[in-house]
Amino acid sequence: MAADPGQVPPAPDTNEAAIAQAIQSVTASTQALVKDQVELAKLEMQAKAMVFGRGAAVAAAAGLFVLGALFLITEGLAWLAWYVLFPNDEFFLGFFFVALVFLLVAGLAGFFAYKAFKKAQSPVPDQALAAARATQATIQDETALMKEQVRDVVVHPEDQRS
């Protein structure tokens, strides 16, 4: 027997199907959002790692040139200190004087480096975390709304029939 085209199917089946479809849609959207958040975190970490790697390579090259220059400067300063401060004594006193000055400068540099490392941020994907928090809040809001709609349909199914 053919169904009457003007006849409306029973509301509970339609409501259950709509609820099931909405739940599937929310689940699929949530999975897609989580995958997007993970991809964003990966891309952000890769970008930070590339910047850090380039900076480390340039710093290493600069360090080699500075090391060579410091060797020559140290040698010159030691001879100059002997010539100016101890002209009648042995020349090794000039080298000890320059070494003492360098140790004091190294101590200050170490202190400033310690302070800088203490302030440094860890390589955390800030944008991805912020987006994940926003997504979580949106999902919670949508879940609460959906719970209310499901509760209304389940508690008052006869009201939904027209």
Image (tube, rainbow, N blue to C red):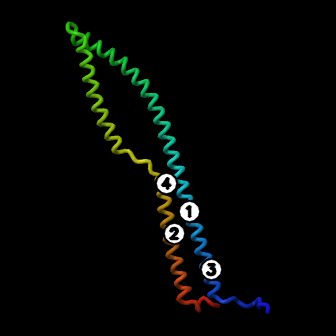
According to the picture, the residue beneath numbered tag 4 turns out to be 127
| Mark 1 / mark 4, whichever is N-terminal | 1
- The type of residue carrying mark 1 is Leu
According to the picture, the residue beneath numbered tag 2 turns out to be 139
- The type of residue carrying mark 2 is Ile
Q: Residues within 10 Å of mark 2 (few under 14, many from 20)?
A: some
Label 4: state its secondary structure: helix
Q: CA distance from mark 1 to mark 3?
A: 22 Å
Q: Is residue 153 above or below residue 99?
A: below
| Residue 20: percent from left, percent from top | 60, 78
Q: Badges 3 and 4: C-beta atoms under 8 Å apart?
A: no
According to the picture, the residue beneath numbered tag 1 turns out to be 33
According to the picture, the residue beneath numbered tag 3 turns out to be 18
Is 91 on the left or on the right of 136, as rendered?
Answer: left
Instruction: Give the residue displayed 37% in from the left and 17% down from the top.
Output: 72
Q: CA distance from mark 2 to mark 4?
A: 18 Å
| Mark 1 / mark 2, whichever is N-terminal | 1
Is 74 on the left or on the right of 126, as rendered?
Answer: left
| Mark 2 / mark 3, whichever is N-terminal | 3
Instruction: Give the residue displayed 77% in from the left and 88% down from the top.
Output: 5
Is 54 on the left or on the right of 17, as rendered?
Answer: left
| Mark 2 / mark 4, whichever is N-terminal | 4
Q: Residues within 10 Å of mark 1 (few under 14, many from 20)?
A: some
Q: Is residue 76 above or below residue 132?
A: above
| Residue 62: percent from left, percent from top | 44, 28
- The type of residue carrying mark 3 is Ala
Q: Badges 1 and 2: C-beta atoms under 8 Å apart?
A: yes
| Discs 3/4, front | 3
Q: Residues within 10 Å of mark 3 (few under 14, many from 20)?
A: few
Label 1: state its secondary structure: helix
Residue furthest to the left in view is 89
